Image: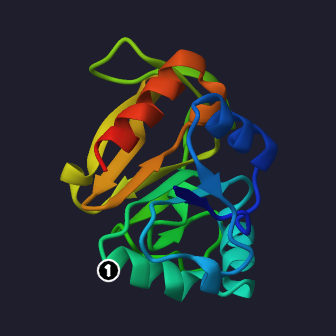
Amino acid sequence: MLEVITAAGGNMGSVLRFLKRLDIRYCCPNSPEQLSGKNPILLPGVGSFGSVMENLSSSGYPEVLKKNSEKGIPILGICSGMQVLFNSSEESPGTKGLGLIPGTVKKFRTGKIPHIGWSKLEGSNEYVYFVNSYHCKPENPKNQSRRACHCGNPFTAIVNRDNITGFQFHPEISYRAGEEIMRRWLRAL
């Protein structure tokens, strides 16, 4: 059972249809107290770093997510949900992220911004769909498991640190590539 946190905002309809299409059992806890502390957690997010953190904080999720992380519960962040896994973001100076992956979120400096569209994951034949103006920069390069390019500049597309994973792209609208990447993440749990 996957526990989906809806407090971070985002395109929940698309994410939930994606999970149904893949026949993934899920529930949507109404509060942090309803998280089981046993099941993997999905943290989708759309919007600014600051607004996603504000939504999570006002609902009481940051401490519970940190405790679940420390217990080894797998957590997957998607889009802004990935970005808030980090310490901070240039998008919202002064706003602290969850700090589950040491690093920062930086603004793209070149090319068309926002980066909207299909980009190939390095080292694969998979194209996935992005909508982002910012990209994650983990302190430890080993946490960057896959990159993609925006206007010739590589950036982190998938990040992993122990039980914490982030997808900067939207697997729910990346068709077969997104479905296969999600299945791989679930198989690895």
Asked which secondary structure carries label 1, the reply is helix
Which residue appears at 39% of the width and 43% of the height? 186
Q: In this view, does 171 lie above or below 32?
A: above
Which residue appears at 66% of the width and 87% of the height? 60
Q: In this view, does 64 lie above or below 99?
A: below
**In this orientation, which residue lies closer to the viewer: 178 or 134?**
178
Quadrant hosting residue 5: bottom right
Which residue appears at 69% of the width and 42% of the height? 15
Query: Residue farthest to the top?
Result: 125
The x, y position of residue 159, in whole percent, is 36, 49
The answer to whether 2 appears left or right of 181 in the picture is: right
Instruction: Say which amino acid is labelled 1.
Output: Glu
The x, y position of residue 3, in whole percent, is 57, 61
Q: Is residue 91 above or below residue 176?
A: below
Q: Mark 1 points at which residue?
A: 70
**In this orientation, which residue lies closer to the viewer: 88 or 41?**
41
Q: Mark 1 packing: few (<14 Cα in 10 Å), some, or many (20+)?
A: few
**In this orientation, which residue lies closer to the viewer: 94 or 11?**
11
The x, y position of residue 66, in whole percent, is 43, 81
The answer to whether 176 appears left or right of 48 in the picture is: left
